[in-house]
Image: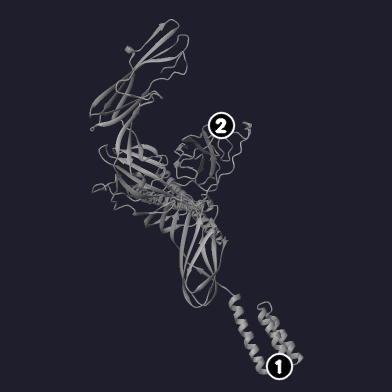
Amino acid sequence: MLGANNLTRFDSSASLQRQGNPVFFYSCYAIAFLNASGIKLIVMKRIFIFIVLCFFYYNSFSQKENQRLNSKIEKVTVFLQGAQIERIAKQNLATGHYNIIFGNISPKIDKQSIQLKAEGKLTVLSVTHQMNYLKEQQIQEEIKQLDGQKEQWQEKIVLEKNIRNVYNQEEQIILKNQVIKGDNATLKAADLKEAADFQRQRLTEVYQKLLENDRNLKKMDAELQKVSRQLIELNAKKDLSTSEVIVAIDVKEPTTADFRLTYLVKESSWFPTYDVRVQDISKPINFQMKANVTQQSGEDWNDVKIFLSTGNPGDNGTKPSLAPWYLRYFVPANNNQFMLRGVSTLTGAVAGLNISNIISGNIKNDKGESISGATVMAKGTSTVTISDAAGNFSLQLPAGSNTISISSVGYAPQELKATNGYANVFLKEESQNLSEVIVTGFGVSSNFSGSYDEGRNYKRKKEETSINTTTFYQPTTTVFEIENPYSVPNDGKLYTVDISSYELKALYEYYSVPKLDQSAYLTAKVIDWQELNLLPGQANLFFEGTFLGNSFLDVMNAGDTLRLSLGKDKGVVIKRTLLKDFSSKKFLGSNKTDTRQYEIAIRNNKQQSVNIIVEDEFPISTQKEIEVQNRKYDGAKLDDDTQKLTWQMNIDPKKENKLNFRYEVKYPKEKILQLD
């Protein structure tokens, strides 16, 4: 039995543990109470053992060890907007509770998308996400070190310039003291030789020192520029933080755990572009599909497996539902409300985009300077174009799209609704700098052997020097796997990679509307194109080894046959002429008759025969007193509704064909008609 003093001492020692472990605290009181109450020793021992077991059980569940993992990005699936990252890690774990920490995660993560798969003898209790701003402190420390280096180089340059001034002054002293005799003194030959030798030797040394000084200054200036550029890059980063994913686990027995963490990140995307090459109209089309990948997610993708998906996680996946359609009278809104015309404010707003198939305009910053290389995208699609050196852009919108997004590295991105007019777009500058486009696609072998696949009009090219690509088909999307590991840094620049290349059988045909443009446009018709998994995008056109310009590949509105416009061909010359000898004006009573006859000459200067379609038209009367009569159009097909004339012909090499059509227009003589 314990006395009061013993109980007091026990209570005093136990009080030291109150904050650390409540089980131990109350156990001490229980043992002291049982001892004071005269409980038998054997019972006390059993109770004590039970309390000790409770103590260790409590500790095992109340204390968790933080375990940082070195995870690696193994796979990246890039969507048209956004990307899914897959990280893997392996760790040997003893029995216990752990907080597994995945570090260096993108700060632009979608928290709802985090998924974890763990293999091993363990149980995952929870998965949480938090920001980590320590990286920003590390960057700030790097900035301090670079500031110190910059100051050192500046001091060295100042010192080197001072040394140069010393040598320049010495040079001037030697040159000014070339007179080495007095007015009444006679200079001996030996003295003259000694003085000349001294001047020559010392001047040579001075010039050598000055030359060495120039070299040192150039090297120092180059190092100073490197440090200055790195400082600009670090200071331009808006968000230097990272984030962490913390996984609470319970390990029942020692195990080797394999972790696979997946999550979605923002500010990542890809869009397709195409190279369409035609050697001549007797050979197939070389059709090459490329992916332009860019990301500013906050983490680098170094030597990872890249998958390109045509899906978009941001799209609404809920099926639409029709609501009741109630008819009400329409009340016109005030057109002056919230309507801007011409140049808008400097917040990225736009005045008057034209809702039509083609959207065009100009992009400037808030200083009025043109922005080249800005990305203009039809929202919800992969239709993209880039502004030229003057900031001009032109984008053909797919059917159903009426919103464009405009972005450029260093400027706040904008989403703009299309309205009537021309677009003057102003982007607000951010702290980031404009980035250039880096093309890192691999070369393509020009060797092609073998025939076309039976039953198909295309064959994939054998490309030994290009990246291998595997295509997967899913219920709603297509995924292109780049089989070779690839790197895309976190710098917002465009990285271009080849996806696939095909030789396509095509029917070449020329098309011309001389009334509008006296040029022959080469077109190509391709069938079975649906199996090529194409997306809308810009196409770069090459014909007979010459770059012709850009076109738009509109696969959304293509039917069974994909029609490609390959640009103008100067080898086919077209001229439309009004034949004045057969054209006249006659007056009869209150009317006059205007007779017009045109000749269209088409000359084929190429080595092969060409198929060509030529179109023109007759005018259509909109007034009862205007009559179009005496139409003649030998060899043409006339559309009665549109009055459009169509000639389709084949022209042999070095030959010329001439087409003629004629019409008369009768109308009141006091009226004026525009017939040109």
Viewer-closest of 535 and 155: 535
Which kind of residue does numbered mark 1 sit on? Ile
Tag 2, which secondary structure?
Answer: loop
Residue 644 in percent (x, y) is at: 38, 24
Using the rendered view, name the quadrant where residue 45 is placed: bottom right
Q: Secondary structure at mark 1?
A: loop
Q: Residue at x 59, y 33 (%)?
A: 340
Q: Residue at 32% of width from left, 12% of height from top?
A: 581
Q: Left or right of 151: which side holds 53?
A: right
Image height of 471 relative to 365, above or below:
below
Residue pointed to by mark 1: 39
For label 1, the crowd category at 10 Å Cα-Cα, with few meaning under 14, some 14 to 19 and many 20 or more, is few
Q: In which quadrant of the rendered image does the N terminus lie?
A: bottom right
Which residue is nearer to you in this view: 149 or 355?
355
Amino acid carrying mark 2 in the image: Gly
Q: Position of residue 335 (x, y in %)?
A: 61, 31
Work out whether residue 660 can be spotted.
Answer: yes
Q: Earlier in the sequence, mark 1 or mark 2?
A: 1
Q: Quadrant of residue 172?
A: top left
The reply, left or right, for residue 629 in relation to residue 62 is: left
The residue under label 2 is 342
Question: In the rendered view, would you say 550 is above or below 516?
Answer: below
Residue 79 point in image, percent of width and height:
46, 52
